[in-house]
Image: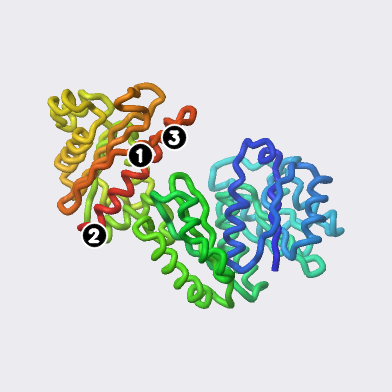
Amino acid sequence: MNAEIISIGTELLLGDIVNTNSAFLARELAALGINVFHQSVVGDNADRLKGSLELALLRADIVMTTGGLGPTYDDITKQTVASMFGLKLERHADSVKRIETFFAHRGIVMTPNNLLQADVPCGATVFQNGTGSAPGMAICHQGKYIIMLPGPPSEMEPMFISHVSPFLQQKTDSVIRSKTVHIFNMGESLVEDRLRSLMTTSQNPTVAPYAAKGEVKVRVSAKAADADAADALIDPVIADVIKQLGSTVYGVDVGSLQNALVQALKSNNLTAAVAESCTGGKVSAAITDIPGASAVFAGGICAYSDELKQHLLGVRAETLSQYGAVSKETAQEMAERIRAVCGTNIGAGITGIAGPLGGTDEKPVGLVFISVISENYNETKQLFLARGLDDERGTIRHMAMMHALSMMFKAAHKA
């Protein structure tokens, strides 16, 4: 079974809004064993939308649309679909009640046009909206399905998971499962070189590396009758990937390096703290993005000036004078002092020159020192993170953050 995704909205074409809906739907449909071979974006124009729908129905069994279900004049999705198939719109009583309740709970006076959201094509299956006002809906025409979902991801995603996914599960006889191997400190080209034989010989599962921001991921996907059978195909290949890539692998389906770190700290009953200079709090922010991080992360200090490094952290004046703020000695003292100040198992210190100003021949832009210290782990790295490109400040800071997280992750496993 094949599906096509059409995202509707002029704001998407203009780049005013990033289209995350297509990526979400493609992943979810793949997990149901439904292939997605085409995606498109069309503006709020009935004729162009009709053309996109007609083309999609020629090559897909399921056409999924997002957007255009609201109450305003440019919300044209269901009107266009109904017109294509000669269906009348009828007011859905349960949706009327839900829309009225939605506005009442928010204490907002509802304008009459909001009830237009309760109009659905005659005979449609209605998917209620648990986080917004516009319901979703599905119609079947000559054995093919058009599924219309709201545009806001906060409404579309839970609607798909709660209502659309069970609806589609009844229409397919297979599943596609994927697992992702997360790799740090090995480039995409080297990952592909190591895995080339596996990639070229594996058909089910398939093996595909792709670059993410500051890391590489390898997705292993298999199609089978059910999830257990797919996992049985995937797991030996995952083991082979890990064997080929070694210690650069930091987890499977762990989401992110910071999530893997927080889980490792929890598993080993450890705590951590961070002293940052050039990263400006990015390491602390990444860790605290993870729910439950407060159980293992005591906190961080962003000590940018030498004065704060001395008076807040306790870095020695002699160290700063003799070696400079950007040095392995300063990074080590930052790690030692934050660990002592916060009373944690692990302390990390990061200092460097993010640029574009401040570099010298001796200490160029992109020079970063990271030190991570615990009872059983003590490592300080000197990194050169500049690549000679224009304005790399953001990239240098991001990569310094990733290296710090990676080193803390290793420390958490040395407990």
Q: Nearer the viewer, mark 3 or mark 1?
A: 3
What separation in Å lies between label 3 and label 1 (alpha carbons)?
A: 13 Å
Q: Residue at x 58, y 77 (%)?
A: 225
Label 3 element class: loop
The label on residue 400 is 1
Q: Residue 256: where, in percent of width, then height?
A: 41, 52
Residue 64 sits above or below residue 10 on the image: below
For the N terminus, which image quadrant? bottom right
What separation in Å lies between label 1 and label 2 (alpha carbons)?
A: 25 Å
Quadrant housing residue 174: bottom right
Q: Quick check: can you spot residue 167?
A: no
Residue of label 3: 387
Disc 2 residue type? Asn
Circles 1, 2 touching at the beta carbon (< 8 Å): no
**Dot 3: within a 10 Å radius of its alpha carbon, few (fewer than 14), some, or many (20 or more) residues?**
few
Q: Residue 231: where, in percent of width, then height?
A: 49, 73
For the C terminus, which image quadrant? bottom left
Q: Residue 301: where, in percent of width, then height?
A: 25, 35
Between residues 233 and 137, which one lies in front from this camera angle? 233
Q: Earlier in the sequence, mark 3 or mark 1?
A: 3
Circles 2, 3 touching at the beta carbon (< 8 Å): no
Q: Earlier in the sequence, mark 2 or mark 3?
A: 2
Label 2 element class: loop
Q: Residue at x 19, y 28 (%)?
A: 323
Quadrant housing residue 386: top left
Label 1 element class: helix
Residue of label 2: 268
Left or right side of 89 for 238: left
Between residues 39 and 64, which one lies in front from this camera angle? 39
Residue 133 sits above or below residue 398 on the image: below
Q: Earlier in the sequence, mark 1 or mark 2?
A: 2
**Dot 1: within a 10 Å radius of its alpha carbon, few (fewer than 14), some, or many (20 or more) residues?**
many
